[in-house]
Image (cartoon, rainbow, N blue to C red):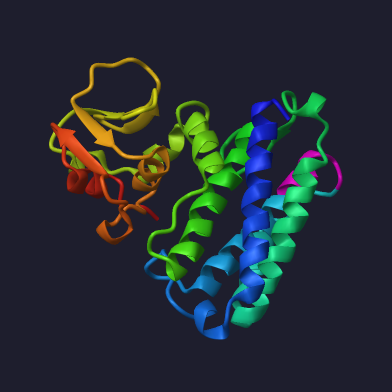
Amino acid sequence: MTTLAGRTIAALRSEHDSLADLVPGLSDGQLTGPSGASAWTVADVLSHLGSGAEITLAGFRAATGEAQAPGSDFNQGVWDRWNAMSPRDQATGSIDANQALVTGLESVPEDRHEDLRVKTFLPDPVPFASFAALRLSEVAHHTWDVRAGLDPAATLADGSAEVLAEHLSGGLGFLLGFIARPKEAPGHAVVEISGTSYRIVIDESARLTTETLPATATFTGSLESALRLLYGRLAPEHTPDGTTVTGAITLDQLRAVFPGF
């Protein structure tokens, strides 16, 4: 698929398939062990992905006319049910729920990718590409959480990082407003990400852009590392060798601006 929605869904499919290969082989100890998300076990992360897939699919089906819009207590009921599952059932159920969601998204004909709008937590329905990207934003980083619990050197999938960067510098730019704490920066900063056209801009808010603004600092490292930085997942123990920041802001100061979720 050549549309932005299509490329986003392809990244979701790749993320799902990688987890579907990994999760069945995890031991009970690995499922209840720590993940890359400090407060969650691996099973907790998988439960979050599974419940989120179920909730997202319900909203998607309502947008396409396949089902009624879920009621106001739907989400809480889903969370309660998933929270009551055993770690093994959370893991297995997560794969099944994500498969159902990705299959649903893949079923949308390409000629509807541009006109379809889907209701989310935002005030107005969003374009289908943005809807899929909101899910990819969750899936890519929580899949990393699972992998990082097993391997501290885990990285984001390159395909996901590239598509997410495109969205974050466009229609999903508002997400950084939720994530960032720009007051933690020593001042205005424009951080160029080496080898890419992207810049992280920090002033009253934070954003990712492809505008050719004069840089005040340089992030030297991969695009996936820069994305993990924005999502609070570039702690020292998860930072690849050779990743540096030079100029008017330091890597530690950027970590404080982007503490994650």
Indicate the position of residue 147 as horizontal and vertical percent values.
Answer: 49, 63
Q: Is residue 19 left or right of residue 167?
A: right
Q: Is residue 14 left or right of residue 180?
A: right
Magenta segment: does it hold 29? no
* Quarter of the image with the N terminus in it: top right
Tell me the residue at 55%/35% (across/down).
Answer: 163
Q: Which image quadrant is residue 65 in?
A: top right
The answer to whether residue 147 is above or below residue 123 is below
In this rendering, the count of numbered labels is 0
Tell me the residue at 33%/15% (across/down).
Answer: 212
Q: Nearer the viewer, residue 80 or 29?
A: 29
Read off the magenta span. Answer: 59-66
Indicate the position of residue 4 as horizontal and vertical percent values.
Answer: 64, 28
Tell me the residue at 79%/47% (across/down).
Answer: 104
Q: Is residue 203 left or right of residue 59?
A: left
Q: Which image quadrant is residue 23 in?
A: bottom right
Query: Is any atom of residue 172 visible in this view?
Result: no
Magenta segment: does it hold 64? yes
Q: Farthest residue to the front: give it.
A: 242
Q: Which image quadrant is residue 159 in?
A: top right
Q: Mainly helix, strand or loop, the magenta region? A: helix
Query: Is any atom of residue 136 visible in this view?
Result: yes
Indicate the position of residue 83 as horizontal and vertical percent values.
Answer: 59, 75
Q: Is residue 232 left or right of residue 32?
A: left
